[in-house]
Image (cartoon, rainbow, N blue to C red):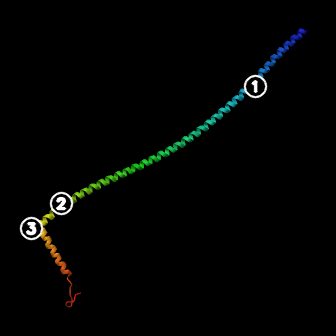
Amino acid sequence: MIIGSLAGLTLGAGLGYFIFTSILKKQAKEVLSKAEAKGENIKEKKILQAKEKFIQLKEKHSSEIKERSAKVQSREDRVRNELNQLKKEQDRIKSSDNYIKKEKEKVEQRLGALDNKGKELEKNRQKSVELLEKISNMSADDAKSALQEQILQEAKEINKPKRKHGNIPL
């Protein structure tokens, strides 16, 4: 009986150990399963947080890029407008230069024509002087002297005082 008790006790202890270890294994599996599930939850939350942070950073980056692009576009537009204004000013200056060149050519032509007329008038004057010298039988200097003398005589006549009522000067 002792052997039977001992065998029962050994068998009971073995069976108890087996049941206890299987319960412990089962509990360990449950704890591991819960820990894995909790770890998965934490992992998913962290992934979700990382995705949200990434989206926020991406949106912030996109808005910064848009802002910079708008500034660059504004500067490009301003430069383009300034270039257009400079081109217009350059065209206006070219137009003014062309106008000035044309006017200068006109003035030069007129000066040339006036110079030719002046030469022609001088020739005609000289011919007239020669003709007058021939007709009057006087040189130009003699005619000039005679004319001066005549003008002096007329001036003296004009400046003589006129008398009224006898010899009383006025």
Residue 109 screen position, x and y as percent: 24, 56
Q: Residue, x 83% and y 17% (percent of image)?
A: 16
Quick one: label 1, few (<14), some, or many (20+) residues within 10 Å?
Answer: few
Q: Give yes or no for contact between labels 1 and 3 (Cβ–Cβ under 8 Å).
A: no
Question: In the figure, residue 119 lies in which quadrant?
Answer: bottom left
Residue 77 screen position, x and y as percent: 47, 46
Q: Which of the marked residues, 2 or 1, is nearer the chain's N terminus?
A: 1
Quick one: label 2, few (<14), some, or many (20+) residues within 10 Å?
Answer: few
What's the CA distance linking mark 3 and mark 2? 22 Å
Residue type indicated by callout 2: Lys
Residue type indicated by callout 3: Lys
Rendered position, 126 above or below 3: below
Q: Which residue is mark 2?
A: 119
Q: Which of labels 2 and 1 is toward the front?
A: 2
Q: Which residue is mark 1?
A: 31
Q: Residue, x 83% and y 15% (percent of image)?
A: 15
Residue 43 screen position, x and y as percent: 67, 30
Q: Which of 75 and 157 lies nearest the eye of the viewer?
A: 157
Q: Which residue is mark 3?
A: 134
Q: Which of labels 1 and 3 is toward the front?
A: 3
Rendered position, 69 above or below 48: below
Residue type indicated by callout 1: Val
Q: Give yes or no for contact between labels 2 and 1 (Cβ–Cβ under 8 Å).
A: no
At numbered mark 3, what does the secondary structure look like: helix, strand or loop? helix
Q: Report the side of 106 relative to 50 (left or right).
A: left
Position of the N terminus, as image quadrant, is top right
What's the CA distance linking mark 2 and mark 1? 128 Å
Q: Residue, x 81% and y 19% (percent of image)?
A: 20
Q: Give yes or no for contact between labels 3 and 2 (Cβ–Cβ under 8 Å).
A: no
Question: In the figure, residue 46 lies in which quadrant?
Answer: top right
Q: Which of the marked residues, 1 or 3, is nearer the chain's N terminus?
A: 1
Q: Which of 140 and 67 lies nearest the eye of the viewer?
A: 140
